[in-house]
Image (cartoon, grey):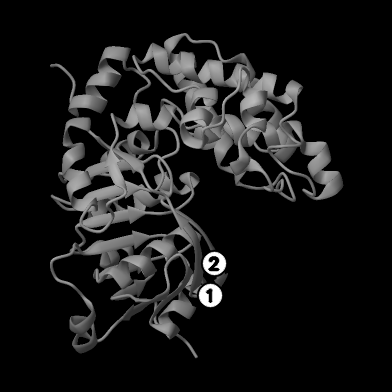
Amino acid sequence: MVLPTTWVRKSRYRSKLIKHDLPRVAVLGAGHGGQAMAGHLGLKGCEVALYNRSQDRIAPIQIAGGIELTGQVEGVGRLALVTTDIELAVKGAELIMVVVPANGHAPMAEAVAPYLVDGQIVVLHPGRTGGALEFVNTIRSNGCVADVLVSEASTLIYACRMLNPAKVHIFGIKNIIPVAAMPSYRTPEVINKLNTVYPQFVPGDNVLKTSLDNIGAIFHPALTILNAGRIESTHGEFEFYMDGATPAVTKVLETLDNERVAVAAALGIRAMSAREWLYVAYDAPGRTLFEAMQANIGYKGISAPPTTLMRYITEDVPMSLVPIASIGAHLGVPTPMMDSMIHLASVIHDVDYWAEGRTVETMGISTFSVKQIRQLVLEGKLDA
C-alpha cells in the first residue's frame, strides 16, 4: 500500500474532536518527543499538524489516524494533518513546536523560513545553547521578514520513548519549564499562548540565561568521554552517574562548569553552578560536585549509554559545548577544558565538531560586542 505524503482527517470527524478555543499547533519532528507532544495535544483537543522530513516515520501514524499514548497520559491523540510538506504543516498554525535534536534546528529553520507569517510563535523544545539565536539568524538569512516570535524552552517537557510506530510511553511530564523569547520583552506573549495548553511553562529571563544554564553541557559529554573505555568494554553495564562520576572525573566536570559560569558572567548573566543546580533540582547537598552527585538519589539506577556514539556527544558537544566555547573565544574568556573535551570528542568519532557545531557565526553575533548581544536578545534590535 502506497501512502500519500500528506494525510488529512476528514472534517466531519475533526469538528467533533477539536476545541476551537485552543491554538492550532504544528509539531515539527516525529521522534520520541515530537510524537508525544503531537499525541498529547491531540488528546487535549488541539488541531494538530505533524510534520516529518521522511515518510517512513509518519506512515504508521497515517494508517492509525493518530498516536497512542501510555504511561502518565493514556489515550489516542487524533491528528488533523500528518505530512512531509512543511508548508502545509505550518499553514494557519499559531504555535510551531520544533521538537528535533538541536543539530536539526538550522536545517528546520531553513526549510520553514519561506512559509512563516506574521504572528506565528516558534518554540524550540529545547534550545540547548544558542538555539533561538541560530534559528532567528537562519530564517532571516533565508529571506524571512515576517514578524515571527522565536523562543526556546530550557528542556523537553516529556520524559518519553516510542514503544512501537505510532505508540509512545510518557514516563513523566516536568512540573516547571522556563521559556524565553527573543526579544525577551515578548516572552509573556509566548507564555500566554503556551499556557492555554501547557500550564507548566513559565517565563525565563532571556535566551542567554536559558542557553547558559544548560547543565547537560557539563554532565553528558565529559562523563561519556572520560568513561569511554568502560562504556565500550561493558556496553554501559554500570551506573552512569554513581559509578562514572568518580572524584577525579568530577574535578574535570567542576572545571568545565567554572568555564561555563565565567562565559555567562562575561555576558552579564549569573548562571547557576552545577552544584547549586543539583541542590535546587534534587535537594542534593555537597561541599563538592562529587558529593552532590553521589547524594542525588535521582541518579541512582541510571545506566551508562551502551556506546559513545549517542546524543550525549553527537548533540551535546556541537550544540552545547561548541557554542559556549565559541562565545568564550569571542569575548576573551578562556575555556581550555571545554576545548579539550571538544577535541577529544572529535577524535573519538572522527568528526570535526568545531566545524559542525553552533558558533558565534551561525548565531549571527560574531561581530557584536557584549552590549550589542544583550540588546539583540533583550530588545530585538541594535542602537542605530
Disc 1 vs disc 2: which is toward the camera?
2
Give whichever of 227, 73 is nearer the camera.
73
Secondary structure found at label 2: strand
Taking the image as shown, residue 279 lies to the left or right of residue 208, namely right
Secondary structure found at label 1: loop
x%, y% of residue 61? 44, 77
Q: Name the residue under label 2.
A: 162
- The residue located at (34%, 17%) in the rendering is 367
Note whether 318 is above or below 120 in the view shown: above
x%, y% of residue 79? 32, 75
The Cα–Cα distance between marks 1 and 2, rounded to whole angstroms, is: 7 Å
Note whether 162 is above or below 201 in the view shown: below
Q: Amino acid under label 2?
A: Met
User: Which image quadrant for residue 187?
Assistant: top left
Give whichever of 69, 126 is nearer the camera.
69
Categorize mark 2 by other alpha carbons within 10 Å: few (<14), some (14-19), many (20+): some
Give whichever of 278, 132 is nearer the camera.
278
User: Which image quadrant for residue 134?
Assistant: top left
Q: Can residue 369 be seen in this view?
A: no
Q: Amino acid under label 1?
A: Pro
x%, y% of residue 285? 57, 26
Q: Are the two marked residues, 1 and 2, in contact with CB atoms closer than 8 angstroms?
A: yes
- The residue located at (16%, 46%) in the rendering is 146
- The residue located at (43%, 27%) in the rendering is 212
- The residue located at (56%, 15%) in the rendering is 335
Quadrant of the rendering where the C terminus is positioned: top left
Mark number, residue 165: 1
Categorize mark 1 by other alpha carbons within 10 Å: few (<14), some (14-19), many (20+): some
Note whether 334 is above or below 36 in the view shown: above
